[in-house]
Image: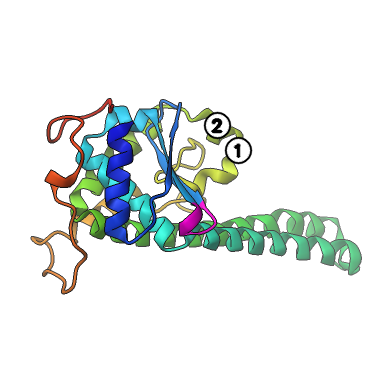
Amino acid sequence: RAGLYAMTAELARNAGLPQPKVYLIDTPQPNAFATGRNPANAAVAVTKGLMQSLSREELAGVIAHELAHIRNHDTAIMTVTATFAGAISMLANFALFFGGARERMGMIGTLMMMFLAPMAAALVQMAISRTREYAADKAGAEICGHPLWLASALEKIAIGAARIDNHAAERNPATAHMFIINPLHAHKHDSLFATHPATENRIAALRAMTPDAAPARAQSPRPTSSSRIPKSGRRGEAGPWS
């Protein structure tokens, strides 16, 4: 774990953030998420499966992505979104049961409203979550200085998440949008109900950030060189980490 803590501290400094708390989750599925009400009270959590699956460069890309969520105040944004989504459902129920809508709409209309209002609320929440993932990918690539580190990590995590269950997330699917890759098997390939953008699209966007794909951007953040990442193994070597 020492290598993970040191890496997170270095990347947090590069992102201009206070060092977040770091948690290791005893789950074989490779995944990670960030939480906290603001940058001063934030945490990054990674699974044991992630530590065992990624090289140190790929892990740096993942940590940088989660730090980008913290810097962008995405946790607060998603809380507001969830509140808004709940308000849609509440207003629909209020209209149905206190506004005389049942008499005007009939049984079929009432059932449709009860079904469609929560669905619409969920779609709003998912759409905002997908937008924030693209932003965190871009900012995370800039924090670590190497877009391909994150692109390679996303590819490995997506494969692992599709093959290995995350029982904690399955029991509480409302948290799926917090993870770097959707931990749930249901709706994983359904674009309408996806909590995240398609992984291949995220990878393509990251690859487009490389110098060979686009002109260098002025005033890019100071990259974290490979030599500055704590060495828990050789370059390119996968976990487990110490």
- Residue pushed farthest left? 212
Q: Quadrant of the C terminus?
A: top left
Report the span colored magenta. 36-41
x and y percent of residue 240 in the render?
28, 25
Say above or below: 71 vs 45: below
The quarter of the displayed image where residue 155 is located: top left
The residue at 41%/30% (across/down) is 29
Residue annotated with mark 1: 172
Disc 2 + disc 1, Cβ < 8 Å: yes
Residue nearest the observer in this picture, 129 or 13: 13
The residue at 43%/57% (across/down) is 70
Say above or below: 185 vs 77: above
x and y percent of residue 131 in the render?
42, 62
Residue 42 placement, left or right of 65: right
Regarding residue 26, the answer to whether it shows in the image is yes
Residue 190 placement, left or right of 139: right
Q: Quadrant of the N terminus?
A: top left
x and y percent of residue 32 in the render?
41, 41
Which structural element holds mark 2? helix
Which structural element holds mark 1? loop
User: Residue 168 — which label?
Assistant: 2
x and y percent of residue 115 in the render?
71, 53
Regarding residue 133, the answer to whether it shows in the image is no
User: Residue 232 — which label?
Assistant: none
User: Local crowd at mark 2 within 10 Å, few (<14), some, or many (≥20)?
Assistant: few
Residue nearest the observer in this picture, 73 or 113: 73
| Residue type, mark 1 in image | Asn
User: Local crowd at mark 1 within 10 Å, few (<14), some, or many (≥20)?
Assistant: few
